[in-house]
């Protein structure tokens, strides 16, 4: 379960709405924010692909300017790759069932 | 109560993030717990910004990554592109054994390193004996470490007596090099990223900085947000992008009309007398033509009078109006400090050097240079295009330390420094990239070493060049970490160590050299390139019975390859080859680089200067030690660049020239190409990471909604893209990105149908020899509705 620490830069006038939106996501925890529009956000997801998708989704929220990574810890996942439990093999049909033939 | 491990890690993540913005969180962590055994400092290798990172190692494996807050490049911030690269280290598809086949029709078989190096030496030696030194070549990369590029080119030039040394920066940076040398007399930017925090106008042209350089773009946006009224962000680009959406002004012009736009801005500056007379009088001359003839300001005024905003608006199309050109020119000229930023949109052009010159012209006319916040700043795409290739001698016409090959004095200087006989390095530059692969096509090159890059995918009009690479009489060696489109055409594949699996220096966009220290061992039998090159040279010396080849690697014999060997190579390069040159790096020893969180900006002739971080701004007395050393008068700026003996900056008279291939009745669309944040370059690396692939699994073709409606193309439809060189079939993305009459394709996909460089044009700039990837003419047609697509990755 990767854990990522992010500084999210938002337009200050959109901050409250963005905080409300973030609170709807169970994988998102906001640890702090300031008047300049910085949010301290920690994401905890099942896989790093889920984290990546979540960042992409949250980056599109109105008023979000940057979603910057500061810290990432993914020991479990690295171990799983080594143990063969996760094979970071590129099989799109596995990732995108709607496009598989 | 003790925290759970997960809670501890979450708090650590939050505290690390909060520390970057000086926020105090009411959280405590138990210092007895640890997220990693040790942290190893290095540089991210996924673009040219040079973000400093630390890789966390636990039980010998990479488990975490974090930014370095004290770094002046990224201040602790990273982007998503860098966050997952530790996965590459553990990826099951990594190349781990040397692979060989005599014929390209055969399957590869595993061989030993001993056998592999013998074959590599034998094939190069045979070629040289039978066809001469220019029948062999090295094609390297802006992703190779400086030590690697330097050692390979030393062996090629002084050992094998050929200047056939090239690298993929020719495809992305060569026009910027040409622009800096012809305008300022010296390669690489005068200023630094630190100018961003002092600029009041950002002129971003031909760059989707928000996606391609996100960590740097954060600084631009922070500057804007902190000073919303004082700071203006201008983006000039034919395509709407995340960068243009955030800009205050978006200049959307037809592809290839930038020279008209830039000259028209200069017209306004001249007409409205917005130029800085003192700066022009003190520091500039006006030049024209191949002979670099000096002309007067009056001549320039006469020349520029042809570029009225009315005429330029006519040429540029899009949303460009005469008033908009006037407005932008006024902001550019009158802002307290203007910083221009650009990348491939300017460089990858048939007149890329001219386009660079015309941006520089605007800065020279207005004196927007050498002051805090004022600079003409070319962004780099690769982590070591500047450091390794431009400075380390990685192109066919330049030796290490910005020395042109053809200048006898400088060539002999290098021969003396290397202790090889004078005359050993040929006086004639080698083949530039397109000429090199044309020579492969013609069978003139019989053996080529391709290091850390995939020309079979990244060359324009690549089918043409893949035919040559597929020839049975061309022996191809590829050093890489993964199979690529180019390993498909290789005879010998040598597995290499990845980043953090070896030690070496990257030099980023802002003249900054930064060291990455080996943190873990490479997988299987993968080896650092410096070891491979050294051992190969020893075998070559035997095969060719030539002690001078051995002499090239003599200072490095017996050294441990993980740290001591690259250190010795860096020491030779910096202490000998950069001494007294404009990129003087003598102060930037490994010890100094390891002491500083973010490395050293050259010129840094002494350790004392290097320990202060080096030179933030070139040419300014008091800030640049060489400006004091080479001063010819009392003026505050001293332009001592090696290419301009007059110590002046040159304003160039460069006429408008359109692209090599413009749309016509047969091929009515502009086709432009680019990259996305998630798929850096040819995808052999980031494409391996499935979560990145999921975000943008296939190349698609971006079509303006108006064009799509006219042609009956709906989102997801399969579209045939045809140019005079070939065709692609891609799914459509109907999107207000490209302007009407233009389509845009990302170039990361390795599937044959979607590999856009099969159809791009290989016309190149006659000065920089950089191809015009950005523009050609195409036609498009709906083939069918959406179709399931198969991914494609090269397997051996």
Image (cartoon, helix red, strand yellow):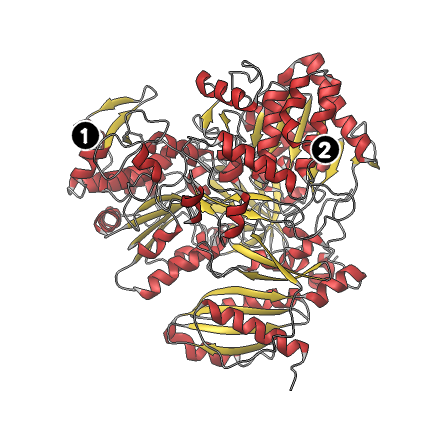
Q: Can the viewer see residue B774?
A: yes
Within 10 Å of disc 2 (Cα), the crowding (few <14, some 14-19, many 20+) is: many
Residue nearer the viewer, B203 or A35 = A35
Residue under numbered circle 2: B489
Disc sitting over residue B297 in the figure: 1
Q: Is residue B155 left or right of residue B217?
A: right
The quadrant of the picture occupied by the C terminus of chain B is top right
Within 10 Å of disc 1 (Cα), the crowding (few <14, some 14-19, many 20+) is: some
User: For the residues tagged 1 and 2, is the chain the same?
Assistant: yes
Locate residue B478: give its quadrant: top right
Which tag, 1 or 2, sits closer to the chain's start? 1
Residue nearer the viewer, A54 or B754 = A54
Picture coordinates of residue B249, whole percent (x, y): 32, 55
In the rendered picture of this protein, how many numbered marks are placed on residues?
2
Disc sitting over residue B601 in the figure: none
Query: Image point 53% across, 64% down: which residue?
Result: A69
């Amino acid at each position: 379960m990767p854990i990522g620490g992010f500084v999210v830069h938002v337009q200050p006038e959109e901050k409250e709405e963005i905080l409300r939106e973030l609170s709807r996501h169970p994988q998102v925890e906001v640890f702090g924010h300031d008047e300049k529009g910085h949010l301290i956000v920690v994401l905890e997801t099942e896989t790093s692909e889920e984290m990546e998708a979540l960042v992409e989704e949250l980056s599109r929220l109105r008023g979000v300017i940057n979603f910057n990574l500061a810290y990432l810890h993914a020991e479990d996942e690295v171990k799983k790759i080594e143990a063969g439990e996760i094979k970071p093999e590129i099989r799109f049909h596995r990732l995108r069932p709607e496009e598989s033939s | 109560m003790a925290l759970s491990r997960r809670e501890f890690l979450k708090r650590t993540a939050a505290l690390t993030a909060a520390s970057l913005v000086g926020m105090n969180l009411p959280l405590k962590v138990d210092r007895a717990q640890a997220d990693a055994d040790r942290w190893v400092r290095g540089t991210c290798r996924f673009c040219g910004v040079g973000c400093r990172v630390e890789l966390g190692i636990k039980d010998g494996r990479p488990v975490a990554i974090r930014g370095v807050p004290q770094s002046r490049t990224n201040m602790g911030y990273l982007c998503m592109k860098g966050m997952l690269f530790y996965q590459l280290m553990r990826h099951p598809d990594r190349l781990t054994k040397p692979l060989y086949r005599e014929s390209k029709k055969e399957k590869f078989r595993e061989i030993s390193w001993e056998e592999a190096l013998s074959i590599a030496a034998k094939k190069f030696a045979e070629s040289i004996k039978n066809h001469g030194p220019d029948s062999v070549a090295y094609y390297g990369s802006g992703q190779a470490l400086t030590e690697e590029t330097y050692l390979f080119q030393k062996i090629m030039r002084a050992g094998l007596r050929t200047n056939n040394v090239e690298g993929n920066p020719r495809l992305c940076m060569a026009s910027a090099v040409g622009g800096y040398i012809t305008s300022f007399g010296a390669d690489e930017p005068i200023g630094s990223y630190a100018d961003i925090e002092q600029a009041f106008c950002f002129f971003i042209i031909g760059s989707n900085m928000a996606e391609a350089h996100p960590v740097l773009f954060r600084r631009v946006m922070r500057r804007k947000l902190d000073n919303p009224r004082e700071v203006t962000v201008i983006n000039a680009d034919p395509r709407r992008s995340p960068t243009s959406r955030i800009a205050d002004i978006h200049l959307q012009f037809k592809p290839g009309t930038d020279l008209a736009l830039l000259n028209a801005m200069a017209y306004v500056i001249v007409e409205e007398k917005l130029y800085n007379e003192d700066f022009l009088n003190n520091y500039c001359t006006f030049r024209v033509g191949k002979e670099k003839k000096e002309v007067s300001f009056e001549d320039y005024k006469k020349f520029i009078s042809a570029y009225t905003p009315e005429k330029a608006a006519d040429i540029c199309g899009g949303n460009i109006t005469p008033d908009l050109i006037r407005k932008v020119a006024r902001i550019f000229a009158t802002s307290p400090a203007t910083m221009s930023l650009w990348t491939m949109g300017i460089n990858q052009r048939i007149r890329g050097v001219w386009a660079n010159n015309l941006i520089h012209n605007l800065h020279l006319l207005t004196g927007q240079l050498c002051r805090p916040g004022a600079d003409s700043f070319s962004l780099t795409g690769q982590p070591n295009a500047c450091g390794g290739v431009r400075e380390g001698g990685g192109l066919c016409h330049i030796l290490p330390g910005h020395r042109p090959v053809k200048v006898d004095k400088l060539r002999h200087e290098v021969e003396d420094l290397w202790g090889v006989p004078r005359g050993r390095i040929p006086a004639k530059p080698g083949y530039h990239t397109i000429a090199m692969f044309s020579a492969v096509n013609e069978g003139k090159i019989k053996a080529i070493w391709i290091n850390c890059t995939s020309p079979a995918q990244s060359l324009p009009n690549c089918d043409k060049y893949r035919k040559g690479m597929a020839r049975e009489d061309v022996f191809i060696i590829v050093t890489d970490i993964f199979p690529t489109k180019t390993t498909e055409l290789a005879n010998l594949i040598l597995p290499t160590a990845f980043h953090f699996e070896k030690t070496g220096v990257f030099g980023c966009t802002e003249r900054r050299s930064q060291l990455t220290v080996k943190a873990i061992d490479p997988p299987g039998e993968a080896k650092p390139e410096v070891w491979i090159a050294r051992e190969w040279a020893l075998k070559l010396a035997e095969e060719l019975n030539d002690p001078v080849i051995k002499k090239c690697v003599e200072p490095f014999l017996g050294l441990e390859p993980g740290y001591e060997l690259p250190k010795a190579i860096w020491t030779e390069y910096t202490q000998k080859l950069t001494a007294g040159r404009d990129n003087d790096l003598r102060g930037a020893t490994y010890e100094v680089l390891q002491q500083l969180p973010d490395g050293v900006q050259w010129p840094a002739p002494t350790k004392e200067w290097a320990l202060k971080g080096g030179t933030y701004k070139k040419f300014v007395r008091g800030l640049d030690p060489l400006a004091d050393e080479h001063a010819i008068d009392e003026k505050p700026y001293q332009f001592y660049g090696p290419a301009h003996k007059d110590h002046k900056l040159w304003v160039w008279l460069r006429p408008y020239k359109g692209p090599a291939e413009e749309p016509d009745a047969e091929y009515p669309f502009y086709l432009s190409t680019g990259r996305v944040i998630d798929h850096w370059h040819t995808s052999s690396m980031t494409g391996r990471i499935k979560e990145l692939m999921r975000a943008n699994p296939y190349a698609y073709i971006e079509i303006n909604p108006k064009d799509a409606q006219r042609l009956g193309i709906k989102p997801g439809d399969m579209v045939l893209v045809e140019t005079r060189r070939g065709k692609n079939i891609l799914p459509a993305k109907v999107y207000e990105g490209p302007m009407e009459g233009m389509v845009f394709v990302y170039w990361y996909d390795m599937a044959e149908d979607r590999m856009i460089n099969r159809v791009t044009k290989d016309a190149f700039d006659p000065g920089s020899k950089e191809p015009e990837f950005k523009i050609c003419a195409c036609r498009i047609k709906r083939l069918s509705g959406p179709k399931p697509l198969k991914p494609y990755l090269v397997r051996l």
